[in-house]
Image (spheres, rainbow, N blue to C red):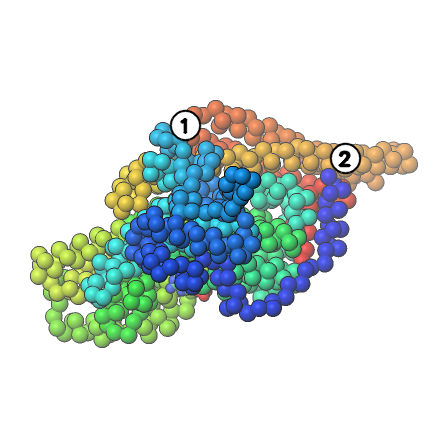
Amino acid sequence: MSLLRFHAIKESLAYKFVNVQEHERRSDLFGRNVFNENTMRQYLTKDAFVGVRNAVQFGKKIDRNIADQVASSMKDWALAKGVTHYTHWFQPLTGSTAEKHDAFFETVGGGMSIEKFGGTQLVQQEPDASSFPSGGIRNTFEARGYTAWDPTSPAFIYETTLCIPTIFVAYTGEALDYKTPLLRALHAVDDAATAVCRYFDKNVKKVTSSLGWEQEYFLIDKMLASSRPDITLTGRTLLGHSSAKGQQLDDHYFGSIPNRALNFMRDLEKECMLLGIPVKTRHNEVAPNQFELAPIFEEANLSVDHNSLLMDIMGRVASRHNFKVLLHEKPFAGVNGSGKHNNWSLSTDTGVNLLATGKTPMSNLQFLTFFINTIKAVHQHEALLRAAVASASNEHRLGANEAPPAIMSVFIGEQLAKVLDELEGVTKGKLSPKEKTELKLNVVGKIPDVLLDNTDRNRTSPFAFTGNKFEFRAVGSMANCGNPMTVLNTIVAKQLKDFKTEVDALINKKDLKKDEAVFNVLREYIKSTKSILFDGNSYGEAWEAEAKKRGLSNNNTTPQALKARISKASISLFEEMGVMSKIETEARYEIEVEVYIKHVQIESRVLGDIARNHIVPTAVKYQNVLIENVRGLKEIFEEKYHNVSKEQVNLIEEISNHIEGINANVTKMIDERRKANSIEDIEKKAEAYCKHVKSLFDKIRYHCDNLELLVDDEIWPLTKYRELLFTR
Ligand code: ADP
Ligand code: MG
């Protein structure tokens, strides 16, 4: 093994980076491999084009005849680009993307063959889906699932395959993927937000949810990464002593992007351009070898697809540059973890961002309405929002001493907090003309100026308002954004629906004017949601204590956090908004709990293996060298040998203690695993894994990492942190 470490280092030092040149303008490359509106105009008949556009914009059904035409044109377009296969591309609950390629090629008898692709193949497919997680849905109801075309996300070509974005559902209709509930949630928020918008502008017919994610990741030399069994099998380091130099100098964040990484980015961005992913920003992140990439925001469903696609192609492009991409939330202890901020807003078909201030008091009242309703939604469903970002890997970030914390809160900045304070004083019931004027001129009317000063962008709150959007920062770097976006859009939809009911009641029963009714309801919301607002001034334990006083949940562990998914309130929320049935919600919960168990189980096995089979034998080897040395000293110095071999003898003893520490804890861990495995109830099993198995990781690691400091570097088998993090 030690040979492998040095071999990997040698290889990585000898690697000459590939220079990636950009010959074409990005705007020329953009969307070249996408069957987008522009391409459709060229390839589709007018009928077919209108059919698809109506499906995209208004959710109209595409009939059989049109589907055939679209399929045939898609095929022509793809064949002209050298494509041989097609696939229904979907996002099962495993967390990655799935595809099964079929050739266009068909035999037609008489030794002849053609390229064929019809409406049936476009619209519906049956993948061999028996091994995708279904939380018991398929066992209980129907043994198979199928994929169905999502025309709202355009087909694209990757390498020589035509990829058709699809949903993945059981034959009985239950969602088995991330996309189906997301589409339903986007529909719900469209309905609810459009209805509220119409208080302010009767021309609004549709509200779209937008998402701009910021993807953080690590780039590690491929040889070095593959020399570590923990990175290979779990995507993170399970042990390793921190490097003498880490991120304390902050020199990576402000430094220039290393050449090899820059070439990887250029290559990746070119692929993104071809696939219509509008990447815009790239920079170093806080930790060494950590980076970030962000696109221009898009409609949420498309943006989610683009992020899933990106995570997939990142790995492939990285390989061309001898890198391994680590998307794990906490690949290295002691250095910054990775997140994926989800920037979210709502906008109308009339071109208004509902979370941006406007030029008139009325448009600012509309802004306040959406702003305050979002805060109220988060307040009401903070535990569910936390559950939406819970995973075994994100547990190391949320809940550990890292920002953002596991406690959900909303940061809005000092200035907007002041505006809310003023609105809290609005008179109950009818407002005097003087008060109305005062509000319009001096409170609502002043918001745009206020926002200009909103520069104190707090980085520690998990949900922050940043000028014209909310930024959900607790999302993990590995996560499929579909899950958090489903939850966020659903809770906002529900809140807007309730808001409308309340405002309408005041207008109809109390005879209030529309703006009076809106002010009245908002005032009550401001009063009742104060506990969710985070001013950015307390951290760590102080904030935990404060949050506890306020009644906010603080679910540090994943099993604990996930429970909110199946609370009575959550189940009825998803049912009411038409996003998920009770069965779907419960199935999803079951899958997430099971995935958690499996992750911890795998990590535990890998850790046990490395500790016992790599670290202990190496420590013994070094100890034998020391023993040999002491023996030699005894031979030379005879009775005086005690004086000259003191240090060696201490070391021998220290090593023995650590070996004992490792063995005792690994034995205990295996025992706890056995106990946990025998538990039937998956909820209890997950808790056992979390409490009794995972809790031993740090103890084992402690002894291993200490041995790393004692044992001769020449024989240490695992590639060290300094080598992983500082190889450029
Ligand atoms: P940072 O948060 O790092 O300062 P920016 O604020 O510039 O970066 O933007 C981060 C992401 O937010 C980008 O993907 C950007 O396109 C997206 N974004 C900007 N405005 C909106 C919006 N109205 N809705 C959704 N996302 C947005
Ligand atoms: Mg950001």
Q: Quadrant of residue 470?
A: bottom left
- What residue do we see at 24% from left, 72% from top? 361
Label 1: which residue? Answer: 681
* Quadrant placement of the C terminus: bottom right
**Given this view, does label 1 or label 2 mark the residue nearer the observer?**
1
Q: Which mark is residue 621?
A: 2
Image spot of residue 81 (x, y percent)? 54, 57
Image height of 233 relative to 42, above or below: above
Tell me the crowding category of disc 1: few under 14, some 14 to 19, or many 20 or more residues within 10 angstroms, Cα based: few
In the displayed orientation, state which residue is furthest to the front.
110
Image spot of residue 26 (x, y percent)? 53, 67
The secondary structure type at the circle numbered 2 is helix
Image spot of residue 716 (x, y percent)? 73, 42
Image spot of residue 312 (x, y percent)? 53, 50
- What residue do we see at 50% from left, 51% from top? 162
User: Ligand 1 is located in which of the four quadrants?
Assistant: bottom left
